[in-house]
Amino acid sequence: MNNRNDTWLSRFFDVFNVIFLAAFSIATIVPFLYVIGCSFATEAEIVEKPFFIIPSVFQFEAYKYIFSSQALPRAFLISVFVTLVGTFIAMFFTLTMAYPLSKKNLVGRNVLLSLITFTLVFGGGMIPTFLVIKGLKLLNTYWALILPGALSTWNLIIVKNFFQEIPQEMEDSAKVDGCSTIGIFVRIILPLSMPVIATFSLFYAVGYWNNYRSSLLYISDNKKWPLQIMLRQIVLLASGNIDGASFDQEYVRPPAESVRNAVIVFGTLPILIVYPFLQKHFTKGVMIGAVKG
């Protein structure tokens, strides 16, 4: 009788789980489909219909407007550059710092871990950080967008935990064969860490791609604005808040509603395109590093 009850409860849970996750997925996907539909729709249809996914008339004027200006393509390339360089630097710092901290015989390890954990709770704040960036003469440079986010404490701890789970015997056998510490790290540790590398590369890339606060604080030259700041300016113009947007002559033309939706699609698609290639490593990389501390 208990087995029957367990089977019934298990099936009920499976059905409930599928229904819940399906509803959650639909609630997540539908708004983005609406934005895509609006980017191809006419202004009249957007005003008349409160909701639609497939527009009755397809038009590409919004995308023609986006690619006819040099502003958005330039901002897009800047964001790609900052994301690629920033992700590489962030992963380099994270991996090279997490590996030695995973060794319990490291001198001063507990002190370093305490200092690192301290930053999870306390931070310098916006104004001290701005003064540091200004003091290093990084204002209006792309390094101001890259270096402040070059290391995440949380990601560092998870990667450290993952390195601790790698059997020490593998490294010992490599040392017997004459492999150096750097050789062990490059030839053994990194190949075994591909799930973690792929996962946290995605985390860093999404953070750099979506970051607009650093650009807002540190970049006053609109020729160096990344994509997210450009999207913000277009949203301000679309809502009529022209005083909040500082544009040169090429930006004066206020975008229509369909242009605003097209810009959202334009800014979101790159991450959505990259994610499927890293998805198979995503769950595995997070769970392995979070098993033990």
Image (cartoon, rainbow, N blue to C red):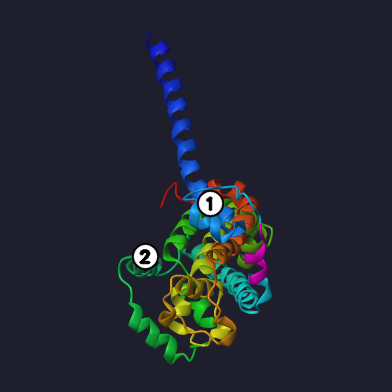
Vertical position of residue 2 compared to residue 286: above or below: above
Image location (x, y in percent) of residue 152: 45, 66
x and y, in percent, of residue 168 in the image: 55, 52
x and y percentages locating residue 23 in the rendered image: 46, 37
As shown in the figure, which amino acid type bears the numbered disc 2? Asn
Disc 1 designates what residue?
A: 34
Can see residue 285? no
Closer-to-camera residue (11/59): 59
Query: Which residue occupies 61% across, 46% down?
Result: 280
User: In x, y percent, where is residue 55?
Assistant: 60, 50
157 shown above or below 247: above
Q: Which mark is residue 110?
A: 2
278 part of magenta stretch: no
Q: Which residues are magenta?
A: 59-65
**SS of the residue at dot 2?**
helix
Circle on res. 148? none
- The crowd level at tag 1 (other Cα within 10 Å; few <14, some 14-19, many 20+) is some
What SS does tag 1 mark?
helix
**Quarter placement of the N terminus:** top left
